[in-house]
Image: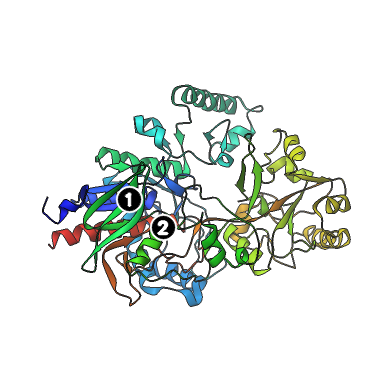
């Protein structure tokens, strides 16, 4: 250690702030490039928002889909993103993403525990737009056995309760047919019995489920490589300031378990701590509906308040500005847990099902219910809504559930008792329960039902695209998303929410943070939701946050390692 480094408690080549997928991917890439890397995480568990996410990564023209014989191209993906982003299109960043994304997939599959699986049929969210694809671009992390993490499993941030069953059991589309047929098929009965038996053993031995899917699988696979490569990960360690010397970031000040530490970073610092979703002040300043008085409930559980962005701005980074959207929206309903904690619940697919409508406070439909969660959130904001109501009939409720209400035979009386689920034998009775004009709601339903009986929605076109029909009821004809509603009726209250912020630090094609003058700040990188959305705040398909996040993490790690080799 030289005299300059003596001012630090510890010195590394690269320090990564944040232990989500992007942070760990950047650390792994840099480590494989020969750098001595440290990861710090403010929370007491690692994984961040990535660990509670769906775990999908949107990577056009990726090697997994090509190996399966699927066709895609750089040009079609470029046109699709350009069409959606409009005035917020970022050509250089998109070019880099489309070139390096497929390379990233091959790199991680060849050098780490990470394994991807493509979806044969998974239409892009605006599948009617030029350049959209019907499948292959969305990649999932392959199922993972959490026991492979050994003692590190205990520190993995657990999944959200609304994507698990039976106290933490994770299931996917391969499991659902067996779960639904458990009493009608011997094969399904034994399948579910083994599933539950293994889960019970995991609960008894590890205190949690070990069958990891979605974001849990993604983070666990990356974490296995982090620990195998002996990359140190400091939990309970939050960034307070960046240290700048002669115009370059050379270290950072952190609070580690209540004590201040100074960490040196010879080749730089990577900011990947996830944005500002938990900051009420920043939400009010950057989200128009919040500034207008609407409630907003983020699904981000980590204490992301944007301190890394603030620290970057203090050393000359360009201030945060909003493009198409400040965040990636997700309508939510509020559920009271057993300990009386109120938590937001995702409303991912129920809106698209037949027998469902969404209305505003006046009892009027305001958008196509089957559009993506992000686009639905945009519609709530564009229409100036404080909240909305999602209404279904009993047939829909029993078959698919609604919000936190599970499908039959799981009982839903507790949700009626808590007030989460509203009920009315007639539409007028339901209108009274939810406080909307009965005459207007009846008129809305009458018009919707008349069209739905013929499989059309002349007002908003529900069920008019491949993506919407996929999210509906497969096989239901003539339109997978439409059916007249018949009483009794039920409703849940939809609130504004998000799955992560979309405005962050401006960066170049190497992931280097840019100053107000548009020049790279030496030694300062960013990726993940800390970085300004390369999509300009629009959402092309499943995995729009993690796909670019992993890609630019790979780019950042490579660039930092290459800078060392040039020294």
Residue at the image position 80 percent from the left and 52 percent from the top = 434
Which structural element holds mark 2?
Answer: helix
Q: Is residue 386 above or below residue 401?
A: below
Q: What quarter of the picture does the C terminus occupy? A: bottom left
Q: Of the numbered discs in the image, which one, if any, rests on residue 254?
A: 1
Task: Tell me how far mark 2 sits from mark 1, CA to CA.
Answer: 11 Å
Residue at the image position 68 percent from the left and 68 percent from the top = 383
Marks 2 and 1, the one that precedes in the sequence? 1
Q: Does residue 153 appear to the left or right of 446 in the view shown?
A: left
Along the line of sight, the residue nearer the viewer: 554 or 255: 255
* Residue hosting label 2: 307
Q: Does residue 558 appear to the left or right of 205 in the view shown?
A: left
Residue 337 horizontal/vertical position (percent): 63, 38
Which structural element holds mark 1?
Answer: strand
Residue 422 horizontal/vertical position (percent): 78, 46
Residue 290 occupies quadrant: bottom right
Along the line of sight, the residue nearer the viewer: 480 or 59: 59
Q: Residues within 10 Å of mark 1 (few under 14, many from 20)?
A: many
């Amino acid at each position: 250690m030289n005299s300059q480094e003596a001012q630090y408690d510890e010195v590394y080549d690269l320090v990564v702030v944040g232990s989500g997928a992007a942070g760990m991917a950047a650390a792994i890439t840099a480590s494989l490039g020969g750098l001595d890397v440290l990861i710090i995480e403010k929370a007491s568990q690692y994984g961040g928002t990535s660990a509670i996410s769906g775990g999908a990564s949107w990577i056009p023209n990726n090697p997994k889909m090509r190996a399966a014989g699927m066709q895609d191209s750089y040009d079609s993906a470029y046109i699709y993103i350009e069409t959606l982003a409009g005035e917020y299109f970022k050509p250089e960043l998109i070019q880099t993403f489309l070139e390096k994304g497929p390379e990233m997939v091959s790199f991680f599959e060849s050098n780490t525990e990470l394994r991807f699986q493509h979806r044969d049929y998974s239409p892009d969210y605006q599948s009617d737009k030029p350049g959209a694809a019907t499948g292959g671009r969305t990649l999932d992390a392959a199922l993972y056995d959490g026991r492979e993490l050994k003692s590190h499993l205990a520190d993995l941030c657990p999944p959200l309760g609304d994507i698990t069953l039976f106290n933490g059991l994770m299931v996917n589309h391969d499991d659902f047919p067996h779960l639904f047929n458990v009493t009608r098929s011997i094969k399904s009965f034994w399948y579910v019995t083994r599933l539950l038996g293994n889960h019970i053993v995991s609960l008894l031995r590890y205190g949690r489920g070990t069958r990891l899917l979605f974001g849990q699988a993604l983070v666990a696979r990356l974490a296995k490589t982090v620990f195998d490569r002996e990359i140190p990960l400091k939990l309970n360690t939050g960034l307070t300031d960046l240290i700048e010397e002669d115009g370059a970031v050379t270290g950072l000040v952190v609070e580690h378990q209540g004590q201040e530490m100074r960490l040196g970073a010879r080749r730089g610092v990577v900011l990947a701590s996830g944005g500002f979703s938990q900051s009420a002040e920043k939400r009010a300043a950057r989200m128009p509906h919040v500034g207008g008085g609407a409630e907003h409930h983020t699904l981000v559980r980590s204490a992301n308040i944007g301190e890394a962005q603030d620290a970057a701005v203090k050393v000359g980074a360009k201030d945060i500005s909003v493009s198409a959207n400040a965040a990636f929206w997700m309508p939510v309903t509020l559920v009271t847990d057993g300990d009386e904690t109120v938590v937001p619940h995702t409303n991912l697919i129920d809106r698209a099902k037949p027998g469902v409508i969404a209305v505003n406070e006046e009892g009027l439909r305001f958008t196509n219910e089957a559009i993506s969660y992000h686009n639905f959130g945009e519609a709530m904001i564009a229409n100036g809504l404080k909240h909305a109501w999602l209404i279904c009939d009993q047939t829909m409720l029993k078959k698919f559930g609604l919000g936190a209400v599970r499908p039959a035979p799981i009982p839903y009386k507790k949700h009626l008792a808590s007030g989460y689920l509203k009920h009315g034998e007639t539409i007028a009775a339901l209108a009274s329960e939810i406080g909307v004009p009965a005459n207007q709601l009846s008129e809305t339903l009458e018009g919707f039902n008349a069209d739905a009986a013929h499989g059309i929605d002349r007002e908003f076109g529900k069920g008019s695209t491949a993506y919407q029909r996929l999210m509906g009821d497969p096989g239901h004809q003539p339109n997978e998303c439409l059916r007249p509603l018949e009483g009794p009726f039920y409703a849940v209250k939809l609130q504004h929410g998000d799955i992560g912020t979309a405005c962050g630090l401006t960066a170049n094609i190497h992931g280097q943070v840019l100053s107000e003058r548009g020049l790279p700040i030496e030694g300062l990188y960013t990726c993940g939701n800390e970085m300004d959305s390369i999509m300009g705040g629009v959402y092309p398909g499943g995995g729009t946050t993690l796909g670019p996040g992993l890609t630019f993490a790979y780019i950042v790690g490579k660039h930092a390692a290459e800078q060392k080799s040039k020294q």
